[in-house]
Amino acid sequence: MRHRFILLLLLLLVAAEAAVTGKAIFYSLTYSLLGIAGLSFFWAWYNISWVQVVRQAQVAHAQVGKAAEERFELRNCGPLPKLWLEVRDHSDLPDHHASVVISSLGPGRERGWTVRTICRRRGRYRLGPVSLVSSDPFGLFPRQRRLELTANLVVYPLTVDLPTFEPPAGELIGGGTLHRRTHYVTTDVSGVRDYYPGDTFSRIHWPSTARTGRLIVKEFELDPTADVWLFLDMEQAVQVERVAPQPAADALPIGIRRPTLDPSTEEYAVAAAASLARYFLERNRAVALVAHSQHYEMVQPDRGQRQLTKILETLAVIRAQGNVRIAQLLAVEGASFGRNTMAVVITPSVNTAWVRVLRGLGRRGVRGIGVVIDPKSFGAERDAEGTLQALAEAGIPAYRVREGDSLAAALTTVAVPGR
């Protein structure tokens, strides 16, 4: 804008001098300045016109600690070269640097580039839009054109591989036999039936097929049924976050990455819930998730990869903004539990009221497990010793997770009070 004002002022002075004196040199200067202004305007306008931009996100979801990748292609559809064209990205994904500056692009030519970003925070993000920015060599007429090229990216929370978890999956309590048909292949065969379109060949019972002369498939049932309910504490009042200074991304040495988990009890609790859901679902258990954050969240118990996707999508966007205590949530939901249920409570709360509720459920045959996110390691004054002691006295297995701990190690080692 300042350069444009100077050019306009200079043009007025030269034009006035030409009109007053009538000298040819001032007329030549006036025409030259008008030509420069016109050429500069055309240059800036043409650079952002007749340009085609294609944006392709490789995946619709990613995971904390893993890469999200997208591909850009820019084509010059005009008859002249493009000189100095910036593609400016407006994504809200942290550390996603997709903006580039192209110094020269010939007519009919195209330029492509791939952006690969390590996801550091779970959540739902928007990729795009983008803006085409250019100007003339004198900076007189900066121009910008916005393109609504957008895509959504869901970043799932971090999950870790757990070699084991108390109790081992084969020893989950089941109570009495509950005969319930299922489309999953289990170790319990309840009978046979005729083949229906869509049945997999792994279900075919070949002896019956050979005997009857038509395709016969096996039917399976869930026996015993040991549903796993994950109770995630999203009460805002019990959360703790340690503010740790992070170096700028360009200041980090090559090969050094930021931690994949922010130092907060919320992020560690969510990662623990995601890891436990994955652990039990991979062992063909029915898993449910209950939490009270911005609003009440429940994922009903089910099995399979689709259930894991549901849970991860819920955990990706959940935030610790609730005002319901975990003891209250556990008491309300646990009232309908039968003997075929395991309740895993994941919380940073040092209030032992939820331990008493879990102990009461244990008298009805519900198996309880506590995963305690130790708030002291995140900067709080109180630690989890009292909670761990109460769990030990109630005979409830407990795990302690501290800030900086390996989740895989913390969730496979039963906590002992005082250690």
Image (cartoon, rainbow, N blue to C red):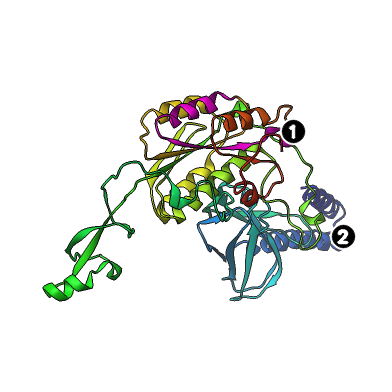
Residue type beneath disc 2: Lys
**In this rendering, which labeled residue sits more in front, label 1 or label 2?**
1
Displayed quadrant of residue 137: bottom right
Measured along the vertical axis of the image, is residue 217 above or below residue 270?
Answer: below
Q: Is residue 234 magenta?
A: no
Estimate the x, y position of residue 15 in percent, counting from the top left. Answer: 81, 53
- 280 lies left or right of 37: left
Image point (22%, 66%), residue name? 217
Residue type beneath disc 1: Gly
Report, in whole angstroms, how far the alpha carbon at label 1 lies from the one at label 2.
Answer: 80 Å
Is residue 324 among the parts visible in the rendering? Answer: no
Measured along the vertical axis of the image, is residue 179 above or below residue 235?
Answer: below
Estimate the x, y position of residue 297 in percent, counting from the top left. Answer: 45, 36
Query: What segment carries the magenta color?
Result: 352-378
- 342 lies left or right of 101: left
Estimate the x, y position of residue 279 in percent, counting from the top left. Answer: 50, 52
Image point (58%, 46%), residue name? 271
Displayed quadrant of residue 193: bottom left
Residue topped by disc 1: 379
- Nearer the N terminus, badge 1 or badge 2? 2
Measured along the vertical axis of the image, is residue 215 above or below residue 141?
Answer: below
Give the structural element (helix, strand or loop) at label 2.
Answer: loop
- 200 lies left or right of 300: left
Residue topped by disc 2: 23
Of residues 181 and 37, the one nearer the viewer is 181
Of residues 148 and 258, the one nearer the viewer is 258
